[in-house]
Image (cartoon, rainbow, N blue to C red):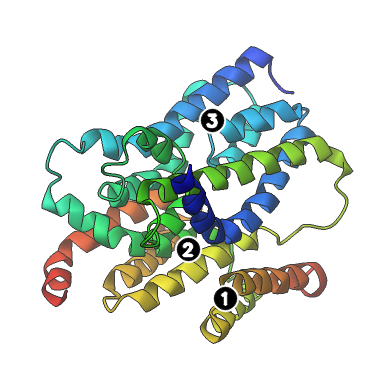
């Protein structure tokens, strides 16, 4: 119990930026879904099980067009393929996390990943509980906000356009933090340059998968250089 | 609702399975009991940095440099985030400040 409380206390500050982002985006998701005629329970159900922000926004469209499970399945694989990256880079960190491991994997969103890949649990805190609480807190924010959004539905009147920039800002900040923490900038530069090139070549709707392939390829080619410098 | 409750439930189940598949696959392919190949470990070490670059680009993917407002609000707001963060090194301030600037820009200046 003591162990859990100290881990919860240590985890909370790290999740504050994500809380801000999730509360806004979760509410927006809830409002959008309710505007398509779905009761707020549906928003909660989706945020609990799917728990993948950008995909849930795509899902709102899927749920309001013709029923096509196969295309929904493929679409989801494409939109969420970046999770494969996160999983590979968390293999080591999630070793020995025991019973909490399935939940840690299930809750590995962009934002949870962005916190956990760049943060180590403080020295006096149980490592596994820390990972668990960061993941759990983030999902609590997301589910609560979706429910609130679904309930408020059409009552929303203030102009929220531009609010989704919260996520961009969060990723930029993490990018800077990672940049400052490393002497080796080749992986970060590769990520940006390859993604921009793929965005130009393949366009905004199709660039994620090629970006991932070419990033992996480029980093494979650079392996010797990077490992020699390290 | 465009479909029946059953259809909506099936669709949500399908999306859940596909999403969780993308999350679980690396852990299924490289279980703890087996030694993970050095190449995969190397990728695990360098991918976070590259992935964050990809995520930033992903967030900005719908910005057009050829159509008005030519990505100016995004450029200003990202610059604000960078400057604020290098100056004060306060995560919430950088994110909140940058987002506020962006919202003001798209709501009042570049309508």
The chain identifier of the residue carrying mark 1 reads B
In the image: residue A1, left or right of residue B92 = left
Asked if residue A230 is positioned above or below residue A32 in the image, the reply reads: below
Q: Which of marks 2 and 1 is in front?
A: 1
Residue under the image location 74 percent in, 23 percent down: B1
- Residue positioned most to the front: A2
For label 1, the residue is: B90
What numbered label is drawn on residue B57?
A: 2
**Element carrying mark 1:** loop
Q: Of residues A182 and B51, which is closer to you in this image?
A: A182
Task: Name the secondary structure under disc 3.
Answer: helix
- Let me know if marks 2 and 1 both belong to one chain: yes
The residue at 12%/42% (across/down) is B35
**Percent of width and height locating residue A166:** 63, 62
Q: Residue at x 44, y 63 (%)?
A: A200
CA separation, marks 1 and 3? Answer: 33 Å
First in sequence, mark 2 or 1: give its number.
2
Query: According to the image, label 3 marks what residue?
Result: A49
Cα–Cα gap, marks 3 and 2: 27 Å
Q: Quadrant of residue A104?
A: top left
Tell me where residue A29 appears, x and y as whole percent: 68, 42
Which is in the foreground here, disc 1 or disc 3? 1
How many marks the image carries: the answer is 3
In front: label 3 or label 2: 3
Q: Is residue B68 among what the camera can see? A: no
- Alpha carbon distance from label 2 to label 1: 23 Å
Same-chain check, marks 1 and 3: no
Q: Position of residue B7 (x, y in %)?
A: 61, 16
Q: Is residue A70 left or right of residue A117?
A: right
Do the residues marked 3 and 2 share a common chain?
no
Using the image as rendered, state which of residue B10 and residue A50 is in the foreground: A50
> Can you say whether A9 is above or below B78 in the image?
above
């Amino acid at each position: 119990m003591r162990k859990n409380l100290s881990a919860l206390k240590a985890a909370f500050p790290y999740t504050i930026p994500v809380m801000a982002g999730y509360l806004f985006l979760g509410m927006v998701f809830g409002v959008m879904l309710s505007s398509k005629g779905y009761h707020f329970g549906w928003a909660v159900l989706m945020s609990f099980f799917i728990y993948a922000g950008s995909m849930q926004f795509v899902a709102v469209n899927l749920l309001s067009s013709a029923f096509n499970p196969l295309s929904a399945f493929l679409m989801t694989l494409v939109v969420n393929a970046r999770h494969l990256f996160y999983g590979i880079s968390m293999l080591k960190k999630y070793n020995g996390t025991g019973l909490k491991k399935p939940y840690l994997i299930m809750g590995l969103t962009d934002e949870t990943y962005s916190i956990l890949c760049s943060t180590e649990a403080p020295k006096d805190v149980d490592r596994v509980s820390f990972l668990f609480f960061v993941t759990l807190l983030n999902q609590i924010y997301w589910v609560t906000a979706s429910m609130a959004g679904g309930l408020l539905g059409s009552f929303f009147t203030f102009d929220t356009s531009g609010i989704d920039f919260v996520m961009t800002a969060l990723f930029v900040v993490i990018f800077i933090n990672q940049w400052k923490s490393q002497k080796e900038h080749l992986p970060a530069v590769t990520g940006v340059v390859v993604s921009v090139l793929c965005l130009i070549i393949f366009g905004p709707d199709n660039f994620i998968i090629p970006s991932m392939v070419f990033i992996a390829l480029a980093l494979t080619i650079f392996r010797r250089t990077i490992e020699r410098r390290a | 609702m465009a479909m029946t409750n059953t259809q909506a439930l099936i669709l949500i189940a399908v999306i859940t399975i596909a999403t969780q598949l993308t999350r679980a696959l690396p852990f299924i392919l490289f279980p703890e009991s087996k030694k993970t190949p050095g190449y995969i470990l190397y990728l695990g070490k360098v991918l976070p940095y590259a992935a964050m670059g990809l995520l930033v680009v992903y967030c900005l993917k719908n910005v057009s440099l050829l159509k008005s407002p030519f990505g100016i609000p995004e450029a200003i707001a990202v610059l604000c985030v960078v400057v604020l963060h290098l100056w004060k090194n306060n995560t919430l301030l950088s994110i909140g400040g940058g987002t506020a600037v962006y919202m003001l820009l798209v709501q009042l200046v570049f309508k």
